[in-house]
Amino acid sequence: MNLCAGDWLSWNDARATSYRGRLKDWKNWLRTYCKTHAVTDIVYYADRVPYHVAAAEVGKELGIDCSAYEFGYLRPDWITLERVGMSAHSLFPDDPEVIREAANGLPQIDRRPLYKFGFWNEAVHEITYNMSNVLFRLAYPHFVRDKLYHPLIDYLSNIPRLLLSRPREKMAAHLIDDVIGVGLPYFVFPLQLQSDYQLRYNSPFDHIAEAAEEVIRSFAKNAPKEARLVFKVHPLDNGIEPWRKILKQLARHYGVKKRVYVIDGGNLDKLLRHATGALTINSTTGIHALRAGCSTKVLGVALYDIDGLTCQKPLDAFWRDGSKPKKDLVDDLERLLGATIQVKGCFYTPEGRHAAAKAMARRLADGTVNLPGALMEKPPRLEKARKLGIATTFDEQKERRGKTELWTRAWRG
């Protein structure tokens, strides 16, 4: 089902159908299409994109199996394939005892990097897809992009960062060594991309700066006086959001300017291995922190936010009394992930795509997505998402769309 020119470039043979109507009419159109063609499965890339939220609701209404796929939790070389959706809508269990029991006897995951690809491989695919939606917009005139920034502005903003990447990485490596070498306790907050739809539609924050302010305020009031707070800029950040300015202003406002650092580049895993604790909204870097044995606090809704893995205490208590993840439970989580909602492969090489497509097709045809042992009747994290005020339905998302961009402009100003 092609919704835009980028879709058409990837899939344009006789089996493809194009939808060129408006987003508000999409649900009714898809409902009719599914009934007419006796559809048995709906599969979508990224579960919280508005079109896919609507598709999931149509599937539930008509009793059609829905599955979402995305970049894997167990990177590199893994792709997530999960029933219905992820994060707040995930049907993966959140009870540690259920996870332990289901993981019993499962093999260790395959950590071999089989499908290597370079930055430019990923960049060319990304630019081709999104710029085609700009250049050939008239072919799908009512398509609603899920990109927060206009693609042209987004990509042009990356040019200065690419040109300065080498000195920036060198400086970041020195800063990381200094933070570790001083020997004082420090906490790491790896920033996500402000444009990430998972951040915008699977968290209570309209802008990362809201989460950063909540963290800095709590840190200033409750963390040990000798502790430091390190913000790590995402390696694919486009530079549109002035993170250093925003974070330094917040740190100054709460009286901790000399205790808050901003690092743009460098090795995150090295930073996590020596950290006292880590914080995240809902990024998969949380799993890296757990793997490093780092006490981790989740601010939004994440699949791995489970008792025994992440700190379940309030944020104010985390700074002095955070709990480290149980190594055996981390291992059980990863083995259950690998056996149920992860397939080996990647999006950016022919071999990786073929391997992933074959594995996904087999699970879809056999009805074994989330099986064995990782398919709950109801999304166990959905109630928490609603309490946090996260938009969980198509209509709720509609009210929130546009608000994020206003927040982004306000913080950038």
Image (spheres, helix red, strand yellow):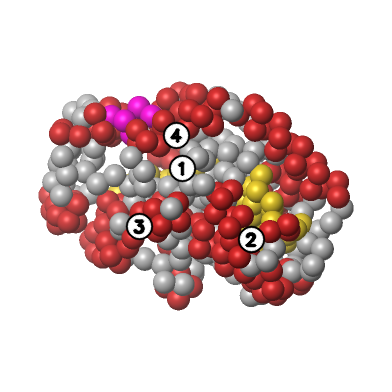
409 vs 125, nearest the viewer: 409
Image height check: is 242 above or below 223?
above
Residue receiving disc 3? 406
Are the residues at dot 4 and dot 3 in contact (C-beta closer than 8 Å)? no
Observer able to see residue 375: no
Extent of the magenta region: 127-132
Q: Quadrant of residue 233?
A: top right
Point 72% across, 73% down: residue: 222
Which of pointers 1 and 2 indicates the residue nearer the eye?
Answer: 2
Q: Amino acid at mark 2?
A: Ala
N-terminal-most mark, 1 or 2: 1
21 vs 259, nearest the viewer: 259
Q: Amino acid at mark 4?
A: Ser
Quadrant of the snapshot with the N terminus: top left
Observer able to see residue 77: yes
Q: Looking at the rendered structure, which numbered label has been put on residue 251?
A: 2
Q: Amino acid at mark 1?
A: Ile
Are the residues at dot 1 and dot 4 in contact (C-beta closer than 8 Å)? yes
Image height check: is 402 above or below 12?
below
Q: Looking at the rendered structure, which numbered label has been put on residue 157?
A: 4
Circle 2 SS class: helix
Mark 1 to mark 2: distance in Å? Answer: 20 Å
Asked whether residue 206 is drawn in magenta, I would say no
> Relative to 259, is 120 on the left or the right?
left
Q: Amino acid at mark 3?
A: Leu
Circle 3 SS class: helix
Point 71% across, 44% down: residue: 269
- The image shows residue 204 at horizontal and vertical percentages of 45, 66
Mark 1 neighbour class, 10 Å CA radius: few under 14, some 14 to 19, many 20 or more: some
Mark 1 to mark 4: distance in Å? Answer: 7 Å
Are the residues at dot 4 and dot 2 in contact (C-beta closer than 8 Å)? no
